[in-house]
Image (cartoon, rainbow, N blue to C red):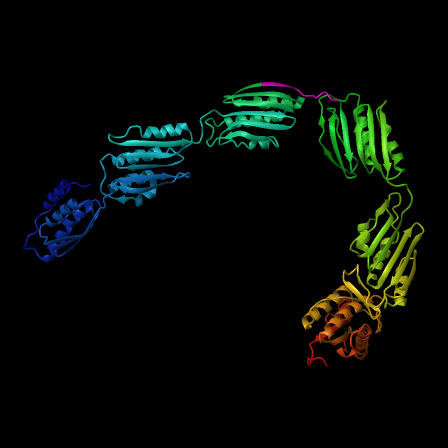
Amino acid sequence: MRKLAGRVLLLAGVGVLGYVGATQNAVRMQAAITENASVITQAALPPIEAAVSGRDVVATGLVTDQTELAVLEATFAGIEGVRTVDVSGVETLPVASPFAITAARNVDGETTLSGAIPTQATRDELAGLAGDTAAGLILSAGVPDRDWAGVVAQGLSALALLKSGEVTVSDQSVVLSGLAASPTERDAAHAHLDALPDGYSLSREIEVEDDGTPLRLSLSLNDGAVEARGKFPADLEASEVAQQFSGADYSGIAQATISAADPQWPIMTRTAMSALAELVEGSLTIDGSDATLTGSGTPEGIARAAATIAGLPDAFTSITDLRLWDDGTPNTLTMNWDGATATASGKYPANFILNGPDGATLEDTGTNSFIDDEANAFAANANAGVAALGVMTSGTLVATETSITLTGEAASPRVSAALDDALSGVAEGTEISRDVTYLDDGSPAAWSLIYDAATGAIINGRLPNGLDTSTVEQTLGVAQLAGTAATAFEDDDIGSSLESLEILSGYLSEVETISYLKDSNGSALDLVLSPGVNVDLVATELAERLPGDVSLSLIVMDPPPENGTTRTNALSGLDEIFSNGYWLPSLSFTADVVECDAQTLKVFERGEIGFLSSSARFNATSTGAVNALAAVALACVDAGLTLEVGGHTDSTGSVLANEVLSANRANSVRTALIERGVPADAMTAFGYGQTEPVGDNGTAEGRAANRRTDITWFAAGAADNQ
């Protein structure tokens, strides 16, 4: 707060600037008044501005109270030549009661200030301690004493030692609270506020992140399990125990939030843990700067552990008690084999190197002892046993220095000789036990495949080695084979089976049943064709295409099913009804032009309507597609739609011949649909010849695409259907 005496002294200073005579002209008088007013405003705190017009002065700005306002007005009025002084634009500082300021520090070290300050000088001082947030402090009247600003500075110095917290100075009351990293920082913050001016009270509530107890570690390694307890600094994560020892339980380690006072403590602890990791079992204790390592391990592990612990920094002391490890059990190899992966376990001599069966994946959980197999008996028996296990389909080997036990399965009795050869190199006096079950009696493959359009495919018998049911399914094009098929391990002659099945896959939509029998004497194929299928065409094609060792017979289903008989087709998955001498899919859809087009497209995606070369006769595999098209046509015509069958050819041959051929083919389709119950008056047929290609007639693929049958649907009464 400014004092009245300050304004009086300022007024006296203004007097020495000289007298402005009444005889001076108005311009010089205004300039002199302006100069004197500037001296007053430059010395004012808070800042004051003055505007001079002739002999009149208008002041704006801030003062601390009414007394200072009166002094300011008198000071301006005391300038020689001033006629009027207007101080209505000068505001009086607000009175803060209590006169308080609060500083808050967050965990990022940022400090924010809020509250009142007595002077601009105080703001500048606090800005040096707390940064830009001092700009938001409110210049106010009501400060309790001259010591107040210094007490605030003490509070900020104490707050700066905390990780987070708050200090409030309200009149002559100081409250400090927050979180310190350790008792050391807490006590230092206390010290900054121990000496407050007389009349000031103090309240402190500071918590600490760390209890101040020494850093420590107790680590035990037993049977591969690791348990840890202790206290780690912030610069050593407890999870590093698990990084050193996979699966270690480190939940018993307290994690401090402050770093180690000695930066070498984490280095020492990591080094000591690395030393323990070299042992089979043991314990590590670290208390402050003392490390004790005890345990047992391999000779190499003990040497590495001792060398590692010897590398501790000079400031730390270490005690070691290390010895060789052995459990006293005999050397034993146990290996399980599934035909692809060998899983080994046990205890082996120090100089033994484990191998798995040739080409196998080896998973080994065994351990080596520290005693060599000087007589080489264990290695001889283990290697012979592994070789014998490898010629088996699956099984288990148990080998020691004096015995071999083999149990499991082998393909056939022929494997017995291979087992004898593998076991010929065992150590002298070794006791050998074999309990092997043979999966196959050695007879040749003989199997059957039965397919029924209503029930699907069944496979039984013994497949040749190298052929499985999955391959048969994929080749024939059926979803899933029922039945049980074994493997004739001694017979790997697949012969013409896959070739025959692949050929048959193109005729599945045309057959009722297939009986395929295969043995060492050849193959027999018996087909029953669906009603309506051209038996002569199918017989001719299959006779030309099937391998020569296939004996073929085929007939059309006779007698056919009764009209109205239903079934689910195993190949298409569609329900079917026998109608007018044909199996027609039972379809359910809302028949309009769009949906009828979509259903027709589905038919042609499942199978094409093909013709013999240069002929209007259907080829051998078109009956199923025509039946499916008839089912769509019946539903759509029943809804009032009509259709056009359009025949198309490629550009091979003359234009006229192609028009005739396409018309004949279109009429063949129309006739076939009529035979299946589609009303004749709902259909027209037209041959477009080569006029509407959809592919490039310059390529075989394009010409094939152009040789097609199109179905065009028309709504009831549509003018297009002419």
Q: Which residue is found at the position 17% from the left and 49% from the top? A: 38
Horizontal and vertical percent position of residue 603? 75, 66
> Any magenta on residue 322?
yes
Q: Is residue 649 left or right of residue 306?
A: right
Horizontal and vertical percent position of residue 131? 34, 41
- Placement of 417 over or under 596, stated as above or below: above
Q: Is residue 105 left or right of residue 453?
A: left
Residue 473 versus residue 655: which sits nearer the camera?
Answer: 473
Q: Is residue 6 left or right of residue 387?
A: left
Highlighted range, magenta: 320-329
Q: Which residue is found at the position 71% from the left and 79% from the top? A: 721
- Placement of 20 over or under 646, stated as above or below: above
Locate the C terminus and report the quarter of the image it occupies.
Answer: bottom right
> Any magenta on residue 294?
no
The part of the image, by quadrant, that contains residue 26 is bottom left
The part of the image, by quadrant, that contains residue 566 is bottom right
Horizontal and vertical percent position of residue 633? 75, 72
Horizontal and vertical percent position of residue 385? 82, 30
- Placement of 232 over or under 166, stated as above or below: above
Locate the N terminus and report the quarter of the image it occupies.
Answer: top left
- Whether residue 571 appears in this view of the structure is yes
